[in-house]
Image (cartoon, grey):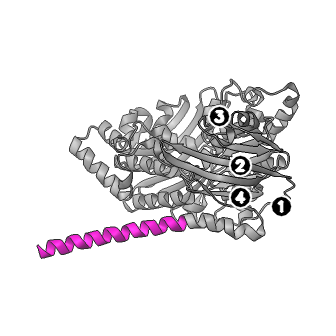
Amino acid sequence: MIEIRNVSFQYANADGEVLKELSLSIRSGECVLLCGESGCGKTTITRLINGLIPHYYEGELSGRTLVCGCDVSERELYETAGHVGSVFQNPRSQFFCVDTTSELAFGCENLGLSENAVRERIQEASEELNMTHLLGKNIFELSGGEKQKVACASVSAMRPEVLVLDEPTSNLDMSAIENLKETLRYWKSRGKTIVIAEHRLYWLKDICDRVIYLKDGRIGFDIPMTELCTYPREKICDLGLRTLSMKDLPLNDMDYRGTGELNLRNYYFSYGGNQVLDIPALSVPAGGVIALIGHNGAGKSTFSRCLCGLEKQFKGRTRLDGKDYGRRNMLKKCYMVMQDVNHQLFCESVKDEVLLGMQDEIKEKAEAVLAALDLDTVCERHPMSLSGGQKQRVAVASALLADKSILLFDEPTSGLDFHHMEQTAQLLRSISGGRTVFVVTHDPELIVRCCTHILQLENGRAAACYPLNEENRSRLFDFFAAGSLQQKYRDGAKKCLKAAEFSREIIYDTVH
């Protein structure tokens, strides 16, 4: 099905090869996990399979990549798209339409299908992936998990033999991840060949058949998933991989030394008459590292934007260090690392990026932060030439060097391997006490390593706020487990409803 033969590749203007004489064979119907530390070549392999290399990403390429018996480099991208469907880390980057129905139709229309055939495929794909309720909606009003589901359905409607997913869970909550698992199970049942490049491994234990571990552009090992599951946690960490089990994650040994409180009042906000934030009053510990959790659509990003003063219509007040601040003043007090860091990278080099607007005396500290995040070797490169994980670390470095009282990180470990997640956690721990840090995340591995407190939002309200300690440990993990269980319950209910409808149809046909 997929043959990669002695392939080497170096991106244009990059310092060295990303893949080095790599050979790989994937059989029809296999579900394969590509894993390894950031920069090992996972994403590059997915781009070889779907034809983005060499047709979109330029560079020096040698060797051959065959999909369904054809050399991808010799085919047009639209031809490869008929055989290979791709779901990217950020689904927004692959949307072409404003509404969901048009998005599902787009790929089919480009295959030259008739209007009736397109309508049939839209209906089939939306029913198969349990997303008929999302048809006809504005894509930009959907949650992250819903956008991911639309991306999967738009690919599924084209009926490709091969499906490639690059970091598909980086911004998803547990409920959305469980939903994605069901999609993958469905594709497997239909005999699809699936290739997944991913850092978060725990959700793939019972999905993937095979694990290909990459190291410095070469295959480190190629083993069954069942064998990887026998590896002890210490060995998994040494390989730079994320945990295979969410149980028994050790809590950090931080001793919270913050003083005082951050008091929030009248945190109300609406979009088009739809209230998404409803917090009349809330106090959180100043100087802590606070994990802001909640399911997709709970109001976390809106809360963050209001706290930073980025929403012009926001009228709430924030009391910090004995002083009361409105929106304009909070703009000067806060620094936010966005979920999509591409929106805040402006300079010609990594070094210039982290020093943007900084005082001269910060330069020595900047070098230490860059080294701590393994960015010192790429400090002269353009930020947009870096991998997704490296870009994320550049944005984190900029925030850490900013002279602000409050720092907000929206999914700071998106696309990060274990070692770089651990480095980010250590740096967040190091600044606690002096500044208040909010971490918007669905990543329990990061939370247990650096956070002192938990703030849980649901439906725009503050559902809980508590210190992260052994006493509250189960409370945190119950929240993440509940998301998975709730999705399983909803899926089971939908299946029962479908079965009931099917039974009614049989009875009706029999009687009439």
Residue lying furthest top: 348
Q: Rounded to the nearest whole Å, what is the CA distance between mark 2 and mark 3?
A: 38 Å
**Between 254 and 457, which is closer to the camera in this rendering?**
457
Classify 10 Å Cα crowding around label 2: few (below 14), some (14-19), many (20 and above).
many
- Mark 2: amino acid: Leu
Residue 208 x %, y %:
52, 60
Instruction: State which tag comes first along the sequence, 1 or 3.
Output: 1
Q: Which residue is mark 4?
A: 454
Kind of residue at badge 4: Ile
Distance CA(mark 4)–CA(mark 1)? 16 Å
Which residue lies most toward the left here?
Answer: 512
The rendered magenta stretch, by its main secondary structure, is classed as helix
The answer to which image quadrant residue 223 occupies is bottom right
Mark closer to the chain start, 4 or 2: 2
Q: Is residue 328 above or below residue 476?
A: above
Q: Position of residue 245 (x, y in %)?
A: 64, 65
Distance of label 2 from label 1 (alpha carbons): 28 Å
- Give the quadrant of the C terminus: bottom left
The residue that label 2 is drawn on is 264
Residue of label 1: 253
| 10 Å crowding of disc 3: few (<14), some (14-19), many (20+) | some
